[in-house]
Image (tube, rainbow, N blue to C red):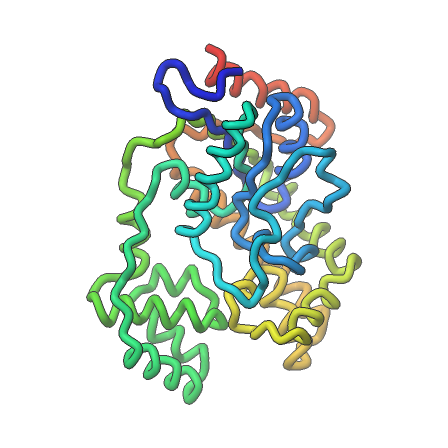
Amino acid sequence: MNIIDPRTGKPRLLVLVGPTAVGKTRYSLEIARRWNAEIISGDSMQVYRGMDIGTAKIKPDETEGIPHHLIDIRDPEEPFTAAEFQKLARECIEAIGARGRLPFVVGGTGLYIESLLYGFDFPEAPSDSRVRSELKHYAEEHGAEALHRRLAEVDPESAARLHPNDVKRVIRALEIALETGETMSGKVAGFREPRESPYAFCLIGLTMDRNVLYDRINRRVDAMIGEGLVDEVRGLLRRGVPPEATSMQAIGYKEIVPHLTEGLPLEEAIERLKRDTRRYAKRQLSWFRRMKGLEWVDVTDERNLIANLEAIHAIITGKFEA
């Protein structure tokens, strides 16, 4: 297959999205094999080394020889942004295409994937160290919940998206609101203004019955606990990764931290994790439904793997070989 689309002259890009636990990894391997593709992770937390169980990261012996990119490229103490993902993913796409293979982005972080598809700009908002220092002091004196309530007063959308314990991002959102008079959520909406994509992309979404998905989520959480998620989080804390680090705000980590640091019963931490994961899946689906050009494939019935793959391959054929 020609890596450059002859009709547009743009590089071809295959993209697979879907909520957590829907089965993207399983399908992505089959798709990549059929279309001679290399996979680029579109997950905001799989970039972190040592965060394997909670992010459902594919194991090296499970890749079936298919190259995977943008996995294990940061230490968990380091931040990672959508702008960085966009830059690195572009570089991966160019390198994969140069090898004559199809770049294939797979993930569930909607902002990351949409920013890549449409080349969002990420202008830096003004930063005032004095304001930031005051907000940090306020959080230390009154607590993260009080700081989060302040954000909810000026930017309710960002407050709904950010966990109260994600103090760093809550402070940044407040800083933007106080310094610019604009909201972070408004800036994100501005990033998403329609624009032409630099790629000839085929965008496919996996979906399934909500009850089936929620059951899969619950079973996945139980499996993660059995695989040693608590020990994984304990190890990160022992190596000095602060609970407020961006990486530790990932679902699967922020729910376990209180069990290890505040005595929260494990059973309650597990229930929080299942609840938060279900809510996250709902937010993912809401984001994907707004993405233009996405073609859905219902994979509710796991027994229909072959038929589901045939439907996916037909969509790709129609997009790239018509």
Q: Residue at x 76, y 54 (%)?
A: 223
Q: Which residue extends farthest left?
A: 181
Q: Position of residue 77 (x, y in %)?
A: 55, 67
Q: Residue at x 53, y 31 (%)?
A: 96
Q: Which residue extends farthest bottom?
A: 141
Q: Residue at x 35, y 31 (%)?
A: 198
Above or below, 58 relative to 318: below
Question: Is residue 165 visible in this depiction of the protein?
Answer: yes
- Foreground residue, 73 or 310? 73
Q: Position of residue 160 (x, y in %)?
A: 41, 62
In this image, 209 relative to 124: left or right?
right
Q: Position of residue 197 (x, y in %)?
A: 34, 32
- Foreground residue, 139 or 13? 13
- Foreground residue, 210 or 51? 51
Q: How many marks?
A: 0
Q: Position of residue 204 (x, y in %)?
A: 51, 30
In this image, 186 relative to 239: left or right?
left
Question: Is residue 296 visible in this depiction of the protein?
Answer: no
Q: Which residue extends farthest right?
A: 226
In this image, 45 relative to 168: left or right?
right
Q: Using the rendered view, name the quadrant where residue 114 is placed.
A: top left
Above or below, 244 relative to 286: below
Q: Using the rendered view, name the quadrant where residue 23 is placed.
A: top right
